[in-house]
Image (cartoon, helix red, strand yellow):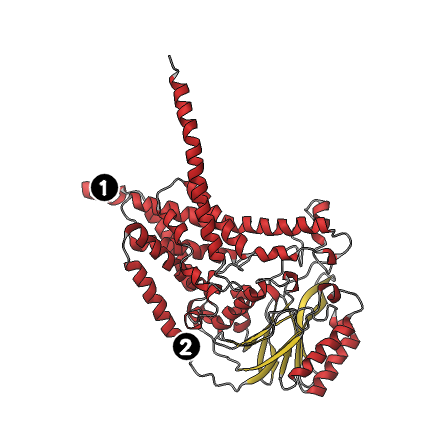
């Protein structure tokens, strides 16, 4: 006689391969959906994929599943998406130019771990967001309350929450902002001047979710509504772009030195670098403002009289203002030195117009979080990634430089991927933005154009001209509508010039910030409350 328990175990065991195969199939579809979405980003420039690539993942999210299944799908999607968007991190290998202790093998380990861990950490955001979204839609469905609008808006609310969370905190990282895929669709992009970038990301998700709902339920009204919103915002954008700007045009230029990392950080090389940049600057002799890249002079410029005095002399002789990336140091209230990844500007009369510093430092690259709590071997390994060998200090507040042609706000490197940092610069009175950066770390990858795309977003959000001076590219001049009016070829010494018009008015987004994003996130909470609110509250009143 067969033991019933044995039969049950055998039957369960027989089902395992089928379940595993099904899970692998759905995981692969979710991974492919995320990977396809990564091709919508600058560099690949298949921007239209952003409006469709999420559909397979969202169709699966509409199907009732267990929490574990939602988490699995969300993790697979996140690894495909975040790993794909940030693949360029792998190009940082080899890091042997950091010094003899950074061997080729150690470099490979560090770079791969950085890419893999970043993809996993960011994927935790997609797991949290879309597991919650899936469970919310499942709970609404069981109550008969999952209508078309909820099915579209729930993913939107949780996507916006994910992006907003990733944009804040010392470990914030917004490279994967979905709105940046549309940096060349300028009429629609103007909507970020009203609401900021996160609602535009939400609109793209809404379009995908509406298609997913149409496929699942054969109901297409939400898709028509999403399309109508996109058309209406594009119409607004055309009007907004053509609004006149009163200020006179200002000739500006960006200089791209194309200095290798080894050459840049070679001690005693500062005078040769300054010669190179001044020689390139002669190509744009009619520009009133000339911007050089981040750490164009990798020294404490204020403490290097020969280099400092030459800026004064050249600015006077040429009648041009020079803004450069360099380093600065001050003494803190405790008497200890504070070091800054800085910018400074010299006016056309040779006067130094002040100093500013990078606001959002890169963890492990510019400072070591928990330096005194890490195990010594890890502290020593991570410390090698910081070329200055000391922790940088973030700039406290924007310090726009006052000139005869407008107030110039400067930021450094990854500052441009954080909307709040650049918005604060505009609120401080800046009438044009200058970003100095050194993206040579990323070789000839798509990261160069992706970084510039964030600058285009910041220009449109605040209606400010935007100059990006990059060591190896992408160096460009962007007008207040987000149009790239001049761009240097990457990985070549270059100087490009164009005219821009400074803008002093504040956009709704500059003035009021992320109010719509907060409203959408509150909507996500409201959907969750509605999904899990007990039914008895209203039913008991009728029984009495």
Vertical placement of residue 12 versus 269, above or below: above
Residue 359 as seen in the image, left or right of residue 237: right
Q: Position of residue 334 (x, y in %)?
A: 72, 60
Q: Which residue is mark 1?
A: 540
Q: Position of residue 529 (x, y in %)?
A: 35, 48
Between marks 2 and 1, how big is the CA–CA gap? 53 Å
Disc 2 or 1, which lies upstream in sequence?
Answer: 2
Q: Residue at x 31, y 63 (%)?
A: 225
Q: Position of residue 472 (x, y in %)?
A: 65, 69
Quadrant of the rendered structure where residue 392 is? bottom right
Q: Residue at x 40, y 58 (%)?
A: 52
Quadrant of the rendered structure where residue 276 is? bottom right
Task: Tell me the quadrant of the picture where the N terminus can be found.
Answer: top left
Q: Examine the rendering and report whether any part of residue 332 can be seen.
A: no
Other residues around mark 1 within 10 Å, as few (<14) / some (14–19) / many (≥20): few
Vertical placement of residue 190 versus 526, above or below: below
Q: Which residue is mark 2?
A: 240
Q: Position of residue 426 (x, y in %)?
A: 53, 73
């Amino acid at each position: 006689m067969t033991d019933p328990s044995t039969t049950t175990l055998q039957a369960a065991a027989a089902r395992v391969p089928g379940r595993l195969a099904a899970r692998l199939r759905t995981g692969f579809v979710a991974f492919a959906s995320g990977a396809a979405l990564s091709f919508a980003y600058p560099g690949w420039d298949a921007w239209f994929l952003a409006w469709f690539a999420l559909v397979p993942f969202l169709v699966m999210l509409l199907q009732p599943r267990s929490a574990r299944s939602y988490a699995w799908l969300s993790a697979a999607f996140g690894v495909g998406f975040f790993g794909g968007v940030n693949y360029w991190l792998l190009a940082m290998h080899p890091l042997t130019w950091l010094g003899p202790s950074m061997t080729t093998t150690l470099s490979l380990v560090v770079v791969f771990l950085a890419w893999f861990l970043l993809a996993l950490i960011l994927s935790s955001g997609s797991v949290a967001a879309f597991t919650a979204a899936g469970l919310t839609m499942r709970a609404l469905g069981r109550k008969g309350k999952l209508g078309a609008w909820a099915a579209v808006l729930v993913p939107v609310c949780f996507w916006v929450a994910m992006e907003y969370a990733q944009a804040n905190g010392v470990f914030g990282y917004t490279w994967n902002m979905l709105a940046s895929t549309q940096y060349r669709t300028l009429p629609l992009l103007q909507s970020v001047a009203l609401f900021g970038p996160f609602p535009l990301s939400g609109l793209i998700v809404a379009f995908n979710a509406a298609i997913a709902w149409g496929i699942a339920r054969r109901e297409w009204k939400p898709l028509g509504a999403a399309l109508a919103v996109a058309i209406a915002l594009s119409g607004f954008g055309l009007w907004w772009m053509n609004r006149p700007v009163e200020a006179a045009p200002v000739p500006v230029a960006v200089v791209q030195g194309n200095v290798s990392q080894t050459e840049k950080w070679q001690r005693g090389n500062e005078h040769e670098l300054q010669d190179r940049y001044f020689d390139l600057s002669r190509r744009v002799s009619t520009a009133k403002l000339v911007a050089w890249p981040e750490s164009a002079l990798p020294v404490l410029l204020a403490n290097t009289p020969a280099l400092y005095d030459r800026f004064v002399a050249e600015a006077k002789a040429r009648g041009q203002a020079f803004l450069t990336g360099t380093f600065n140091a001050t003494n803190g209230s405790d008497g200890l030195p504070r070091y800054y990844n800085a910018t400074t500007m010299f006016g056309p009369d040779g006067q130094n117009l002040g100093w500013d510093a990078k606001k959002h430092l890169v963890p492990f690259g510019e400072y070591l979080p928990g330096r005194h709590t890490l195990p010594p071997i890890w502290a020593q390994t991570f410390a090698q990634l910081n070329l200055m060998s000391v922790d940088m200090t973030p700039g406290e507040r924007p310090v726009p430089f006052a000139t005869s042609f407008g107030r110039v706000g400067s930021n450094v490197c990854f500052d441009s991927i954080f909307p709040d940092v650049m918005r604060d610069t505009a609120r401080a009175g800046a009438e044009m933005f200058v970003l100095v950066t050194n993206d040579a770390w990323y070789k000839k990858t798509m990261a160069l154009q992706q970084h510039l795309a964030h600058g285009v977003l910041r220009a449109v959000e605040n209606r400010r001209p935007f100059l990006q001076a990059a060591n190896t590219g992408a160096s460009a001049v962007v007008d207040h509508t987000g149009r790239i009016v001049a761009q240097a070829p990457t990985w070549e010494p270059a100087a490009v010039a164009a005219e821009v018009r400074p803008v002093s008015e504040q956009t709704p987004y500059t003035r009021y910030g992320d109010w719509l994003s907060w409203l959408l996130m509150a909507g996500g909470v409201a959907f969750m409350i509605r999904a899990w609110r007990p039914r008895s509250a209203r039913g008991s009143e009728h029984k009495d």
